[in-house]
Amino acid sequence: MKKILYLEDDLEIGRIVKEDLEQRGYFVHWLTSGEGAVEALKDEELVILDVMLPGLDGFTVGQRLKRHHPEVPILMLSARTSVDDKLQGLNFADDYVTKPFHPEELAARIEVLLRRNQRAMPEEIRVGRLIVNLTENRILTQSGEEILLTAKQHQIFMYLLRHPNQILTKEQLYEAVWGASFLEGDKSLMVHIRYLREKIEEQPSEPKIVETIRGIGYRVKL
Amino acid sequence: MKKLRQSLLIQYVLIILVATMFIPITVPALSILFFNFTPEDDSSDRYYNGTDIEQMWSSTAKELGGATEEQIRDKFLEMKGIYPEASLYFIDEEGQNRLKYPESLEIPQHWSASYAVDFMKKNRGGEVDPFTVVSFIGDDQGEGFIVLQIPRSDMVSPSSINGELYNYFIIGTFILILIGFIVISTLFFYRIRKRLLHLQKVMDTSEGNSIPSAVEVKHQDEIGRLGQSFNRMVEELETGRKREQEEEKLRKELIANLSHDLRTPLTTIRGHAYRLKKESLSEDGQESVDLIDEKVNFMAELMENLLSYTLLHAGKYPYHPEEVDIVRLIRTSFAGWYPIFENMKFKIELEIPDERIVWNIDPQWFHRILDNFFQNVYRHAGNGRYVGIKIENRSVIIEDRGPGMSAQSGKKGAGVGLSVVSLMLKEMQLNWDIDTSEQGTTMKITPK
């Protein structure tokens, strides 16, 4: 059972969140002030932190926690919505959720953070007619044929798989794969995607795995 | 003395007064000085006037009546002492030249009657140079005559030279006084001008915070008092600024606290609604819970917009303009909204070029504006099932086929959001056109 350290001074909100997260199968260690938070953090895998805490404020507590336990992700939960506050929070925190948040949204974000931290991607992803083994970096068709990709094709495909259901713009993809800023008019990404499709799609002219979102970018739906 | 130092007017009046008083006082004073120091050179035995010389010469000749040549010579030497420039000669009754001074004088040894007449004729008149006087020795004409010739240049008396000098002296003095007055006046005004310029420079210099620093007051005159007033003003400005900053800080804290205090109960409401939803509820109950949830969202957004609007209006909303490729920005922004419109079975039309279009805007602000537009399409234009984004002729166009803004009665609250958008666009120098009808709404953003 995953443990979460939760700092919240509002008793009502605290109770609801604790209850909901416990129902979702987490163990919640709830503190009502920032004092002693660093000492309290032992085997918890995530910290949920309110900004307006009595005594030490959330920003200070968060920075201290990050200094002592840099590996533990911090999710800020705050009623402060200004860009400045968000930026200040994201200096050290891994996510920033504003109140009033929806409990389901909070749960989803917690899941993302925990997964990211553990690199807990499933070993195998099924996408269309393919089975992608992420640990072995192998792509097989359902019939067991292995598909070999070039380095760039592989990088592009993996980046899309790591951001499933998300539309990635040309710029985002290019900059993630090539590591250089995208120049308008550069066709190399398009060309690589065309070759990628020829290898992985059943009908490259009607792609089902790597979707083109016209005018925006590409998406892989899982 | 104190008053003098405190008033530029009095100082200047004094300068004028001194300048005017100088003339009546200095002229007599200088005259006295002048005449006391120039030599009183009217040595009594010397004459400069023609008539006086003639009289002196004829009486000398009379006195020489019966005198020996030796005596005449002595007299001549005496005369020569008084009139060093003069020529003197003695012609006896025979017409024989007996004495002449200076020795180099070229005159005939023997004077014939015709020569004498010619000589007399030549040397007569007021203008003839040298001035010539002829006198017979003694009472009758039997002893011959003596001649005295003085160059006109030697007949100018020193006092008349002094008179001329005096005129020059007075005129010179006047000119000097005038120049002195001009110089002093110029210096006086130059000093005033310098101080005024200095003051102006100090008032102009803004040290970033736009309040000039205080000036140093050295003199207690009008300009000095101006400086003091200026310093008082600066001081007041500074206290005002400080107070304003304190108020600003208080206000910011108040808004932040208010926002926090309102959001906390909203969070609780939402949490409880969520809990309720998990209970077994009737269909109506579920609907109510959904409505509560939706209203919580709406309230939160309203608060956010109100906060932004207040900050924007006060010019306190953080603004960081930079060169932004809006094509890329729109693409990124719409990538987030695409799945939502896709789920709602919208027809999505994107017509954005494959080239950079750079605007000088704050990307965060523009993101927020686009989000606001897309949100409005999502909320109010769902019936149209259409969203279009175009970049045409340097304009960004967002279209929907909803019922138009006038029909947006169901879900109000777009007002504050659009006010925020309007303020942000204005701040970023962007023009904004809305074309709304029952067939749909078109938003158009164009740089000015």
Image (cartoon, grey):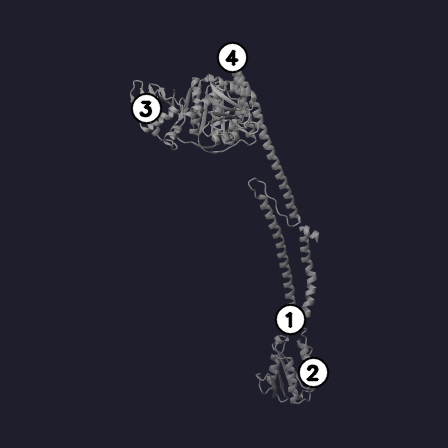
Whether labels 2 and 1 share one chain: yes
Q: Residues within 10 Å of mark 3 (few under 14, many from 20)?
A: some
Q: Position of residue A216 (x, y in %)?
A: 40, 25
Which subunit holds the residue at mark 2? B
Asked if labels 3 and 2 touch by Cβ distance under 8 angstroms, the answer is no
Q: Nearer the viewer, mark 2 or mark 3?
A: 3
Residue annotated with mark 4: B279
Q: CA distance from mark 1 to mark 3?
A: 129 Å
* Rendered location of residue B363, percent (x, y): 47, 30
User: How far across and down, in percent of the image, does residue A188 sit?
Assistant: 34, 30
Q: Are marks 1 and 4 on the same chain?
A: yes
Mark 2 to mark 1: distance in Å?
Answer: 29 Å
- Reading the image, the residue beneath label 1 is B161
Between marks 2 and 4 in the image, the one whose residue lies nearer the viewer = 4
Q: Up-down: is B314 above or below B266?
A: below
Q: Position of residue B373 (x, y in %)?
A: 48, 24
Type of the residue with mark 1: Ile
